[in-house]
C-alpha cells in the first residue's frame, strides 16, 4: 500500500513538474495584463522614458541580487545576447509607454498582442522560414481586428500617434521573442536576464532627450512604489519567459500569451475604462487571430504541398471576400 502511494505521489510530482513552465506562463500572463493599467497610472507622476528606465533598473537590481554569484562568469555570448534583447526591450516598452499617454490600457494591450502573429511573419521575412498556412489566416483575423480596434474603416486606415507607437512596440517585442528563442539554449538565463534589463534601463534613460524629456520628474512615493512593483513584475516576466521558452512549445506559449490582453481589458474595465462595441469586437478578433495562427489541423499537416501555397495571394482573396460581404458591412455599420 505504501509503495502504491509513493508511486502515485511520484507520478503526481512528475506531472506537476512537467506542467510547471505552462502554469508559470499563465500566472505571468495574468501579471502582465495588469501592468498596462499600472503603467498608465504611473504616467500621472512621471515622464514615459524616465519611468521605463526606473522600471527596468529596479528589475535588473532584483534579478541581480538573486543571481549575483553567476555574474562572475559572464561570457561574450551572454553580453551579446543581453545587449540585443535589451535593445528590443527598450524599443518595445518605451514606445508602448509613450503610446499609453494617448490610448487606453485595454487598447494598448490588444495592439501589443499583435506581436504573436508577427513572430512567424518576421521569421519568414528575416530568415525565409515559410510560415504555416494557418498563420496567414490568423494574421488576416488580427489585421481585421486591428482595423476595428483603432476606429478605422476597411476602406481607409489611419492611426493616431499613440496607436502607431504601440504597433512599433509590438514589432520590437516580436523581435525580442525571436531573439530569446534564438539565444535561450546557449546562454545562462540569470546572467542574460540581468544584462538585458540593465541595458534596457540605460538605453531608456539615454533616450529621454529624444522623447522630449529634459528634466527628471519630482520625487513621489506613488512613483517609487509603482516603479518597484513593476520592476518586480518585469523581473519575473523576463526571467520566466527566458526559462519557460526552453521547454514550452512555441505554439502553446503563443496561445497562453493570447490571454494577456483579455486580462488587461478586464483590469481596465474594473478601473472604469470602456471600449466601444466595435473596438471590443476588434480586440476579440485579435485574440482569435492569435489562436488561429497557432492551430495546425492534422488535415493541413498531412499535405506538405500546402506549405508551398502562395499565402499572400490567398489572404488577399479572402480579405476581398470579407470586405465585399454585405452582411459584414451591415454589421460594422450597426456597431458604429
Image (cartoon, rainbow, N blue to C red):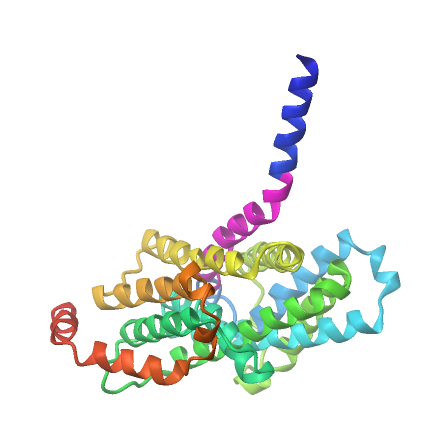
- Residue range of the region highlighted in magenta in the rendering: 17-39
Percent across and percent down for residue 2 are: 69, 14
Question: Image point 64% across, 57% down: which residue?
Answer: 235
Outermost residue, top direction? 1
Residue 194 or 272: which is nearer the viewer?
194
Q: Is residue 104 left or right of residue 86?
A: left
Residue 302 or 183: which is nearer the viewer?
302
Q: In this view, does 26 lie to the left or right of 310?
A: right
Residue 224 or 167: which is nearer the viewer?
167
Quarter the C terminus occupies: bottom left
Quarter the N terminus occupies: top right
Q: In this view, does 45 lie to the left or right of 143?
A: right
Residue 133 or 328: which is nearer the viewer?
133
Question: Image point 31% across, 65% down: which residue?
Answer: 285
Percent across and percent down for residue 110 are: 39, 66
- Residue 280 in view: yes
When the figure is inspected, residue 69 is found, relative to residue 78, above or below; the finding is above
When the figure is inspected, residue 227 is found, relative to residue 83, above or below; the finding is above
Percent across and percent down for residue 279 are: 27, 68
Q: Residue 159 in magenta?
A: no
Q: Is residue 111 left or right of residue 69?
A: left
Percent across and percent down for residue 221 are: 56, 56
- Residue 198 sits in which quadrant? bottom right
Main SS of the magenta segment? helix
Q: Residue 33 in magenta?
A: yes
Count of numbered circles on the image: 0
- Residue 173 sits in which quadrant? bottom right
Question: Image point 60% across, 37% down: which residue?
Answer: 16
Question: Image point 39% across, 83% down: which residue?
Answer: 312
When the figure is inspected, residue 124 is found, relative to residue 270, above or below; the finding is below
Outermost residue, right direction? 72
- Residue 100 in view: no
Amino acid at each position: 500500500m505504501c509503495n502504491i502511494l509513493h508511486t502515485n505521489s511520484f507520478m503526481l510530482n512528475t506531472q506537476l513538474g512537467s506542467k510547471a513552465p505552462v502554469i508559470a506562463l499563465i500566472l505571468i500572463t495574468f501579471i502582465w495584463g495588469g501592468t498596462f493599467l499600472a503603467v498608465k497610472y504611473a504616467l500621472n507622476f512621471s515622464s514615459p522614458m524616465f519611468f521605463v528606465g526606473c522600471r527596468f533598473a529596479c528589475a535588473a537590481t532584483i534579478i541581480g541580487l538573486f543571481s549575483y554569484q553567476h555574474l562572475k562568469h559572464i561570457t561574450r555570448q551572454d553580453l551579446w545576447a543581453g545587449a540585443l534583447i535589451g535593445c528590443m526591450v527598450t524599443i518595445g516598452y518605451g514606445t508602448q509607454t509613450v503610446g499609453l499617454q494617448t490610448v487606453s490600457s485595454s487598447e494598448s494591450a490588444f495592439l501589443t498582442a499583435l506581436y504573436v502573429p508577427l513572430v512567424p511573419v518576421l521569421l519568414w521575412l528575416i530568415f525565409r522560414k515559410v510560415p504555416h498556412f494557418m498563420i496567414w489566416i490568423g494574421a488576416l483575423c488580427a489585421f481585421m481586428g486591428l482595423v476595428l480596434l483603432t476606429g478605422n474603416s476597411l476602406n481607409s486606415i489611419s492611426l493616431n500617434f499613440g496607436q502607431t507607437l504601440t504597433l512599433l512596440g509590438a514589432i520590437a517585442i516580436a523581435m525580442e521573442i525571436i531573439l530569446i528563442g534564438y539565444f535561450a539554449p546557449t546562454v545562462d538565463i540569470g546572467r542574460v536576464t540581468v544584462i538585458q534589463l540593465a541595458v534596457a534601463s540605460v538605453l531608456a534613460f539615454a533616450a529621454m532627450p529624444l522623447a522630449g524629456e529634459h528634466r527628471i520628474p519630482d520625487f513621489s512615493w506613488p512613483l517609487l512604489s509603482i516603479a518597484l512593483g513593476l520592476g518586480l513584475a518585469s523581473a519575473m516576466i523576463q526571467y520566466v519567459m527566458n526559462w519557460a521558452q526552453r521547454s514550452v512549445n512555441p505554439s502553446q506559449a503563443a496561445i497562453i500569451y493570447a490571454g494577456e490582453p483579455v486580462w488587461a481589458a478586464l483590469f481596465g474595465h474594473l478601473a472604469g475604462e470602456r471600449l466601444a462595441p466595435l473596438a471590443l469586437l476588434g480586440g476579440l478578433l485579435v485574440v482569435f487571430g492569435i489562436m488561429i495562427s497557432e492551430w495546425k489541423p492534422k488535415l493541413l499537416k498531412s499535405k506538405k504541398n500546402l506549405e508551398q501555397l502562395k499565402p499572400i495571394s490567398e489572404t488577399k482573396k479572402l480579405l476581398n471576400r470579407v470586405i465585399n460581404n454585405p452582411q459584414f458591412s451591415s454589421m460594422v455599420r450597426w456597431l458604429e
